Amino acid sequence: MASKETALIVGVGPALGSALARAFAAGGMAVALAARKTDTVRPLADEIGGKAYACDATDEDQVETLFAAVAKDLGVPDVVVFNAGTFSIMSVLETEADHFEDSWKINCLAGFFVGRAAAAAMKARGSGTIIFTGATASLRGGAKFHNLAVGKFGLRALAQSMARELGPENIHVAHIVLDGVIDTERGRAMMKDAGPDGLLAPDAMAGNYLHLHRQARSAWTHELDLRPWAERF
């Protein structure tokens, strides 16, 4: 039996995913980091004493294999974060069907695979937290952002349906709207005039994910929006 809580983060990159891993580890949890290739996350796993796993979240079999491996190695996850995503800014007139479908698979279908596997494992135990990372595009489709918006709209609907079904099973399902640009090299290039407070700081964001997991069930948050104070909304 696992001696401490387990966190599984699916979609670990150098910004938010890495900050989540560090935050959960600092919170005393065993952390499983999943990305398409383990070599991208193994150094971080070694740093925090976690474990790296390779998983293409758009592949149903790989997701099921991931959850089985994590349960065996670290225990059934107490909190699962679906943090995978992709987007490209382009005209709908320039978008080919394969590109559109691939974006939907990563932003939405993968979330279904991960959410379903998490729900099955947590229902058997009788508790858990599932958190989906959304975006401004979860709420409105901007010009040339259809590839992101369609998948994120679907992911938000999935989170709402799962929350209503699984709440009575003591499983907290939450959706986080990231309404802003994350502080990364790419983000700083996009928002050259944003200033130090105009970008979403990964460490600050990660603290909110941990807070959601720690909430008492008498005051659960389903949807949380995070944005820099300077972001207009």
Image: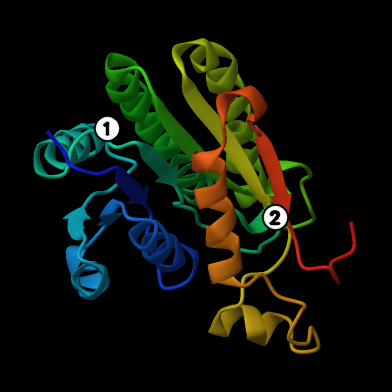
Quarter location, residue 120: top left
Crowd rating for badge 1 (residues with CA inside 10 Å; few <14, some 14–19, many 20+): some
Left or right position of 212 against 117: right
Left or right position of 182 against 60: right
Residue at horizontal 60 percent and vertical 32 percent from the top? 154
Q: Which residue is mark 1?
A: 60
* Label whose residue precedes the other's in the sequence (2 or 1): 1
The tally of labels here is 2
Residue at horizontal 54 percent and vertical 46 percent from the top? 100
Looking at this view, is 171 or 43 the one in front?
Answer: 171
Location of residue 13 in the rendering, given as x and y in whole percent from the top left corner = 40, 67
Left or right position of 82 against 153: left
Location of residue 14 in the rendering, given as x and y in whole percent from the top left corner = 41, 73
Q: What label sits on residue 161 in the rendered view? A: none
Quadrant holding the N terminus: top left
Question: Is label 2 in a helix, a strand or a loop?
Answer: loop
Question: Is label 1 in a helix, a strand or a loop?
Answer: helix
Looking at this view, is 71 or 65 the one in front?
Answer: 71
Left or right position of 130 against 73: right
Location of residue 160 in the rendering, given as x and y in whole percent from the top left corner = 62, 24
Q: Which residue is mark 2?
A: 145
Residue at horizontal 59 percent and vertical 15 percent from the top? 164
Report if residue 103 is visible in the image.
yes
Question: Could you give the CA–CA distance between mark 2 and mark 1, rounded to whole angstroms?
Answer: 26 Å
Q: Is residue 165 above or below residue 6?
A: above
What's under tag 1, amino acid-wise? Glu
Crowd rating for badge 2 (residues with CA inside 10 Å; few <14, some 14–19, many 20+): some
Residue at horizontal 72 percent and vertical 49 percent from the top? 225
Looking at this view, is 143 or 177 the one in front?
Answer: 177
Quadrant holding the C terminus: bottom right
